[in-house]
Image: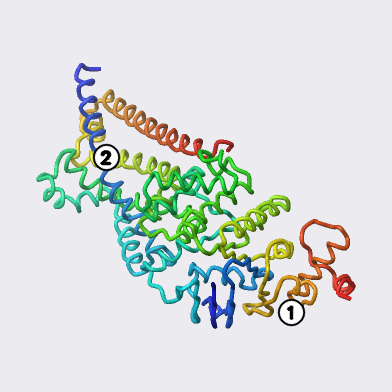
Amino acid sequence: MREDVVDLLWEGLRQTLYMVAWSSVFALLLGTLLGITLVVTDKGGILAAPGVNKVISTAINGVRSIPFIILIVLLLPLSRLIVGTTLGPAAAIVSLSIGAAPFLGRIIENALREVGDGKIEAAKSVGAGPFTIILQVLIPEALPALVRGMTIAVISITEFTAVAGAIGAGGLGSLAIRFGYQRFRTDILLGTVLLIILIVQILQWSGDYIARSIDRRRFKNG
Amino acid sequence: MITVTNLNKSYRTRSGTVSALTDINLHIEKGEIFGIIGFSGAGKSTLIRCLNRLEEPDSGSIRIGETVITDLKERELRLARRKIGMIFQQFNLFDSKTVFGNVAFPLKAAGYKKPEIERRVGEILDLVELGGKAGSYPSELSGGQKQRVGIARALAGEPDVLLSDEATSALDPQTTHSILELLADINRRLGLTVVLITHEMDVLRHICGNAAVIEAGRIVENAPVRELFHNPQSDTAKRFAGIYDFYNNTGNSGQLEVPKPEQREAVLR
């Protein structure tokens, strides 16, 4: 083991966390918007618009069917437009956010669909409008499922950052390729793998913990 | 108070159009407890859900008080619904909110200020005898308590009408009784018009003045409940009256069960 290991891994970890955090925030915002739109515009939804629903749904399927590494390449011009470069963590955040948003959209859609129609009808029956229903009924009722879904999504984003590292994004994935693979630095390779495992464990543990505490507050006997 | 005129509703299914309600005409007086009884699939749930347009009727008109419900646009309908409370078989409470939060929901949606909300929720929870449960979540309540929260939520906006969609069907007989007592009490104290649908004759007998019998989407009988028992005209009413007498005579208070024809003949004779 050489003395640069700690510095390299520390820098990689910092970049990975930076990418995961910002990509998750942006993907979450976009995905939440997509997920809610999918649910409320569906046939029989509170803002039913089957045409809009179909278009969004098809677009999501389209983006999701492109392998992520190809999507990054496709989005390079957009990265250049937004952050001025196609290299480094900041550029990767653009691709990661857009790549993960449709996935998050589906996850959020699924969580929101679990909210029973009866609850939505009860809200309608007292005169609540669509936005009150979304903010006060759909989201709070689905919260534990939303947290669990988002945990899965953030972990996927962590995996994606490692892939993005292969084509110039920086972070632990890039370290593993540049040092571990191209320069036969087994110590760095193992270090990056351990760190990624650690990140994923912490994310899963936190997500479970939050979802469980919400459930426990609401369902004390269960 | 409520007038339904020539109401029709059908559903489109893969195998064609199914008529759910055919030419429904009803008049319900202010302050009465009106029952609608029928077997499963007769269309009673569709009918009551048309009254606040959770289901959109195909044709016909519904008037509640001075408002023609069937003429309202979305936004007007929302305002009108604040004056039409509804309670449900499955309670449909919000698991994410405490009892207080559930009852406060209609008031928040209507834009009430916080002190006003706290005062009103407190009053209504006392009315339904859940004063000490404001901070509990629905999962901590019994079925009867849940329905009391449902009733409180429905009453929060001080409605003129309360619609009850099989509100006691998921409850045991004793709890059913206490919920019916509560509804009767609210009806007396607040002068609220109550429309309830049920498949239990006991519910009608306990609190309804007049009732309509619905059969295959049509109202086949509309009379004071006493008459429905003593002189039933329609098949449905006869079967319900038969069931009722049957249990009354044998002292059996168990689940509803359609009596065998010969037993039914015996009671009817």
- The residue carrying pointer 2 sits among few (fewer than 14), some (14 to 19) or many (20 or more) residues within 10 Å by Cα, namely many
Q: How far apart are marks 1 and 2 (CA)?
A: 71 Å
Q: Which residue in the structure is indicated by mark 1?
A: B234
Work out whether residue B168 can be spotted: yes
Q: Tell me the SS state at disc 1.
A: loop
B194 to B72, vertically: above or below? above
From the viewer's perspective, is residue A215 above or below residue B183? above
Q: Mark number for residue A161?
A: 2
In-image side of B152 versus B200 (left or right): left
Image quarter where the C terminus of chain A lies is top right
Q: What residue type is labelled 1?
A: Ser
State the mark number for residue B45: none
**Chain hosting mark 1:** B
How many neighbours does mark 1 have within 10 angstroms: few (below 14), some (14-19), or many (20 or more)? some
Element under disc 2: helix
The chain ID associated with circle 2 is: A
Q: From the top left corner, tell me how far across and down residue B208 is, in percent.
A: 68, 66
Residue B40, x across and y down, in percent? 67, 68
Q: Which amino acid does label 2 sit on?
A: Thr
Name the residue rendered at 36%, 30% in the picture.
A197
- Residue depth check, mark 1 versus mark 2: number of the one nearer the observer: 1
Determine whether, in the image, residue B40 is placed left or right of residue A101.
right
Specify the quadrant that holds the N terminus of chain A: top left
